[in-house]
Every structure is written in C-alpha cells, then in structure tokens.
Amino acid sequence: QVQLQESGPGLVKPSQTLSLTCTVSGGSITSGNYFWTWIRQPAGEGLEWIGRVSTSGSTNSNPSLKTRVTISVDTSKNQFSLRLSSVTAADTALYYCARQRRIEWIEIFDYWGQGTLVTVSS
Amino acid sequence: DIQMTQSPSSLSASVGDRVTITCQASQDISNFLNWYQQKPGKAPKLLIYDASNFETGVPSRFSGSGSGTDFTFTISSLQPEDIATYYCQQYDSLPFTFGPGTKVDIK
C-alpha cells in the first residue's frame, strides 16, 4: 500500500520561501507511470493544483504560481519536494502531496498524503 | 485555464434520498472528469474517473455521467457516511482544475 507523508515547517514568514517534502513509502517513486503532485487547500476553500514532477524530473506547474514554484524529485530518498518563494498570507493553506496515475488517457490522483498546514505570518 | 463550476454549493437531504450534483466546464473536456469525496479533516478520495467509471471499492450508489461541458454526480440513496464535500476535477488540460465543491449534509 503506497503512503505519502508531507513534512516541513508549519510557519513561514512573509516574503520567505516555503519548503515541503513528501516521502513516499510502500513502493518506489520510480516505478510505474506516475506524476508526483502538490495540491493546496486554503481553510474552508477548494482545491488548487500547484504542479507535478515526473520521475525523470520534468515538471509542470500552475501558471498562477509558475514563477514562484519549484518542484523536484529525489529518487534516492523516494521523496519529492515543493519550494514556493516570496510567500504571502494568501499562500496559507493545507498542502497535500499526491500521486497522479496515468492510465492511457486517464489521469487520476489515487493516493494522497494527510496534508500539512502551512501558515504565512510574521 | 478551464473553469469548473458546481451546483448547488451545498445541500441537505434525508437518508435514502437521491442526491444530484452538477458540474460544468468552461469548455469541452470530453470525458476527462473525475469526482472526489472529501470528508472533514481528510484528504480527498477518488470516487469516479473518466466521468462515469467507478474507482475500485466505491459503493455502487455513487455514479457519474455526462460529457463535453456538462456532468452529473449522483448518490442514489444517501447514507450517513456520505456526509462530505464533493469536487469535480478536469484533466483535459493543464493546469488541472477543481470545481468549488458541493457540501452534502444529512437533514
């Protein structure tokens, strides 16, 4: 059973960089046709796709965040990471990591972490 | 970006009722739509993929239909454990986008 677990600081100061890591267990991050994804959810609000990384290291990110987002993968540690620069209070949210599985034309988020709350405040 | 809308934003129904949620895309997304259930304090869970296909283990009271821009999600007989917020999500093109959610309560 694949499990994902987010980790990182729960509090980040405005203008600084938010850094989160997702550790994948129960399977190799390099096996299968997957993208490793970050999604966030402000309190009481909906879900926003931040971006994804493939095991080859290719990335896609949301244009609304693109210049601030870096997503990377460390296959030796079975982890992938998110860095979001120049944060503001608007970046306060519950951050989820998730596995995106591709089956032919179908793309689904089939495994999720439990989420980690990041608050941006001085 | 493809904008997703859902209606209603919330609903309250009795146990055993049929519940229907609609989702509309701002452009044609064929069948490239998933439905997720999010219970309070939990991560979303995939219920329906490709507009109408059941994820393994999902109860048969949940179903989805539609194509193009208009989609429907149905709970045929609402159960107490179905209290959750339901989101549609398109994967026709990046960035993937979610609907704003429909919160379902028991009356």
Image: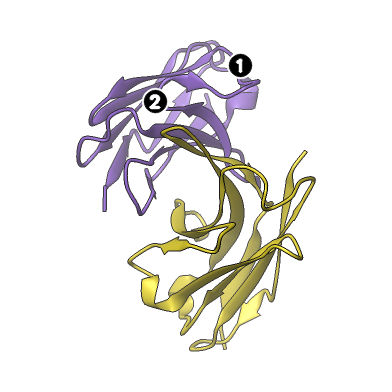
Output the letter for the chain in purple: B
**Dot 1 alpha-carbon crowd within 10 angstroms: few under 14, some 14 to 19, many 20 or more:** few
**Which label is found at residue B51?**
2
Report the residue at 64% width, 70% height from top: A20
Closest to the camera, between mark 1 and mark 2, is: 2
Colour chain A is painted in: yellow
Q: Where A68 falls versus A40 (above or below)?
A: below
Screen quadrant of the N terminus of chain A: top right
Q: Where A102 falls versus B83 (above or below)?
A: below
Q: Mark 2 lies on which chain?
A: B
The answer to whether the residues at label 1 and label 2 have Cβ atoms under 8 Å apart is no
Q: Name the residue under label 1.
A: B59
Report the residue at 38% width, 62% height from top: A62
Q: What residue type is labelled 2?
A: Ala
Report the residue at 74% width, 50% height from top: A28
Q: What residue type is labelled 1?
A: Pro
